[in-house]
Image (tube, rainbow, N blue to C red):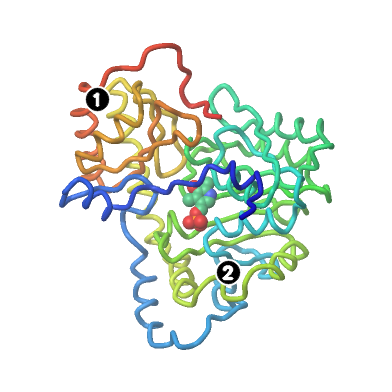
Amino acid sequence: MKVSPEILNMTPYRPGKPISETQREFGLEKVIKLASNENPLGPSPKALAAVSKALSQQHFYPDPSAYEFLGTLEKMWKVPREKLSIGNGSDEIIDLLTRIFCEAGEGVLTAQAAFQAYQVSSSANRLNLYKTPLTKDSRFDLRAMAEEFLAHPERKVRLIFVANPNNPSGTFVTRAEMEDFFARLGGRDDVLLVFDEAYTEFLRAPEAASAMDYVSKVSNLVVLRTFSKAYGLAGFRVGAIVAAPEIIEIYNRVRKPFNVNDLAQVAATAAVQDIEFIEASRKVTWEGLEYFARELTRLGLKFLPSQGNFVLFDTERDAMQVYEAMLREGVILRPVLNYGMKRELRMSVGLPAENEAAIRGLEKVLPKIPKASGDYVPFRGT
Ligand SMILES: *Cc1c(COP(=O)(O)O)cnc(C)c1O
């Protein structure tokens, strides 16, 4: 069996540990999962009702054009349908973009500690991934990224991924920084600027913005959205891509016609119209983030201010030990060793009782684990 070096050297993506596995391994009945940035309120109730009604129609293939779904996005997001398409989660879209717009040996650019899917898809498709250092406050440095792109034409960078907000850090780029970035790289025909907005619904900083506002002005801009986070449909696997019609047309040639199944389309169509649910998701997230900020401060732990539905904090210890100890307490957090962060853990916002259980767990386990020694600057990653 011959396997390419890029694939042999890949670090596989390790998803959050499932509840059932944790129950089995530790003999626990009650387990709280705050590991995958899922919506603690569950799916939108309107989505569930729509799915129940559609069950009896599942002997038919899904609509490959997603006519109803895209029509609803058109209305809700005020984007014409020629600029929209769908993916089996935005994960699939990330992978398709690397397959479609790059040749083997070409480059992809992102930032240090960026969402790991960019790395996985780049390696799987034999591309070189380059990473620009973060700002001092651990944010994507868009100016440095643009400069690095311009300084290295020999790398043949075809895609630039900006996660805004980023996972696992929860940091964001400002509207002013985005505008400067578009002024530098917008309109080029040799590179696509991909803004991954998986957590855009949770943005609340006044300087924050969605790249969606620029899709009609910046011809090489691609915006990704997901239904896995604020809409509560992670299990259904639905993502959306927003870009110029020429980009969407190419994307649709390569995407499988039935990549998003019918129930998923039905669920997402209902969820995107469920304004009340989105408002409730925001509220529970923002209140949870405030609670975490207060409690982590009380415990003397540093964390990054987050614009997502999770918080990255420094345990000041070997994070794997804290993670294991928390599992025994029935709380699944997310290690971020794969991002080169050995002391940090990521904790998703849950329901208030879940958040409280997580903090109680930390309060119990941390004193039993020795503090790490030596110099370490948290929240940088690799
Ligand atoms: C969760 C996440 C996604 C995508 O999730 P899908 O479930 O594949 O839609 C994309 N980007 C970032 C930064 C994420 O955190």
Q: Residue furthest top?
A: 374
**Residue 200 visible in the picture:** no
Name the amino acid, label 1. Leu
Relative to 162, is 365 on the left or the right?
Answer: left
The C terminus - image quarter: top right
Q: Nearer the viewer, residue 179 or 125?
A: 125
Against 63, residue 105 (above or below) is: above
Q: Nearer the viewer, residue 1 or 92?
A: 1
Relative to 338, is 279 on the left or the right?
Answer: left
**Residue 80 visible in the picture:** yes
Q: Secondary structure at mark 1?
A: helix
Relative to 208, is 328 on the left or the right?
Answer: left
Against 166, residue 94 (above or below) is: below
Q: Secondary structure at mark 2?
A: helix
The N terminus - image quarter: bottom right
Report the residue at 62% width, 77% height from top.
65
Circle 2 is placed at which residue position?
Answer: 75
Circle 1 is placed at which residue position?
Answer: 366
Q: Percent from the top left, x then y, of residue 283?
A: 35, 48
Q: Percent from the top left, x then y, of residue 183?
A: 78, 39
Report the residue at 36% width, 45% height from top.
35
Label 1 or label 2, whichever lies nearer to me, is: 1
Report the residue at 26% width, 55% height from top.
20
Q: Percent from the top left, x then y, of residue 191?
A: 78, 47
The answer to which image quadrant residue 241 occupies is: bottom right
Give how far apart the Cα atoms at labels 1 and 2 are.
49 Å
Q: Percent from the top left, x then y, of residue 206?
A: 53, 38
